[in-house]
Amino acid sequence: RLGFSDAEHDFEKARRVTRCRQRGQWRIYVLPITNCYPEHEDTHAHDFHPHSPNHPKNEAAFRDFALMLRATVHAHSYRNPASGSVYDYKMHAILHPRAKKCRSTEELFTVRSGTGDDAESYNGIVDRSVMLQNLGYHVEFKNPPLSKESIQGSDYLREYMAKNDVGGQIVDLIRLYAYELEEYDAVVLVDYDTLILGPIDKAVDLIVDSNKEDTVGDTGNTDTGSGEESSNDNSSIDAVFSWEHLPSLVNPQARASVINLSFFLLHPSKATFADLVKRYQNAPFSE
């Protein structure tokens, strides 16, 4: 930063590390998993448009992706001193119940069932919750907060977002539960298209430093460098994301601007979660 000495830079970094550690609240990466993606095509293979071409097609690919994601996050976190990051991390997977046990033809990823003479050689089932926990993820199971029938305000949402619903459930909406993780400073929603190439401290700082409760209330010290701004509720930043242009669901010849959910950084809030669920139910959404 122009105008600051190396010593001042080091002091500021040490202050931020201490503040982060004292609060015990770090960034958490949340991976929503809605299906197994069986090797054959079925009606459950595409929960929501657009479908990612990087969606793992077997359990070996799924394991490799989960391992790679955690490794890249780790490499650009506080745990790797060479990264220069001041933030620690945790990995979190939100699974729809149908994505817990997935069938695989690869013996490496299957488990024996039964004992003695009744034992089967391999049952062909992979428990993804166990696999993810072994790779360092916290795992929780969630059903969607909304069903197709509960959407009252938008024919568009009912027709397109629930196009491939499962028993009336809009499984893609399990990602909304990321907003309930209030014990963390910031939540990073990721998917199968995510690749972390460097520290994301500057983006996390936008969330952390602009939030009144995090920068003042949790530290017990109002002299945080952002106290004056945080006194204005309108100054808070609750999400950091990018846009992309994709073919329209209504008119494939046209292009629509949509939020890229491969990297969606948010400030967790149960109040925001409740508000979003209500908006999905009643708001007159259109493309």
Image (tube, rainbow, N blue to C red):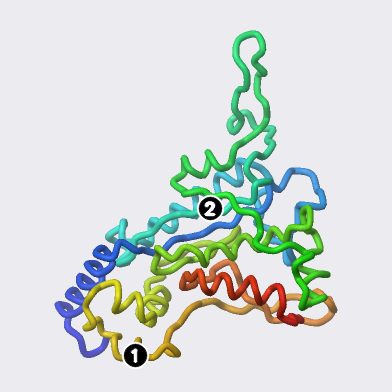
Q: Residues within 10 Å of mark 2 (few under 14, many from 20)?
A: many
Camera-side residue of 134 and 69: 134
Which quarter of the figure has residue 232? Answer: bottom left
Q: Residue at x 60, y 14 (%)?
A: 115
Percent coordinates x, y for residue 87 in the rendering: 33, 65
Q: Residues within 10 Å of mark 1 (few under 14, many from 20)?
A: some
Percent coordinates x, y for residue 218 in the rendering: 29, 72
Q: Residue at x 64, y 39 (%)?
A: 101
Residue highlighted by disc 2: 93
Amino acid beneath label 2: Ala
Q: Residue furthest left?
A: 7
Camera-side residue of 164 and 217: 217
Query: Which of labels 2 and 1 is toward the front?
Result: 1
Q: Residue at x 25, y 67 (%)?
A: 17
Quarter of the image with the C terminus is bottom right
Which quarter of the figure has residue 145? Answer: bottom right
Q: Secondary structure at mark 1?
A: helix
Percent coordinates x, y for residue 188 in the rendering: 49, 66
Q: What number is the disc on residue 266?
A: none
Residue highlighted by disc 1: 229
The number of discs equals 2
Amino acid beneath label 1: Glu
Measured Cα–Cα span from mark 2 to mark 1: 34 Å
Q: Residue at x 48, y 43 (%)?
A: 133
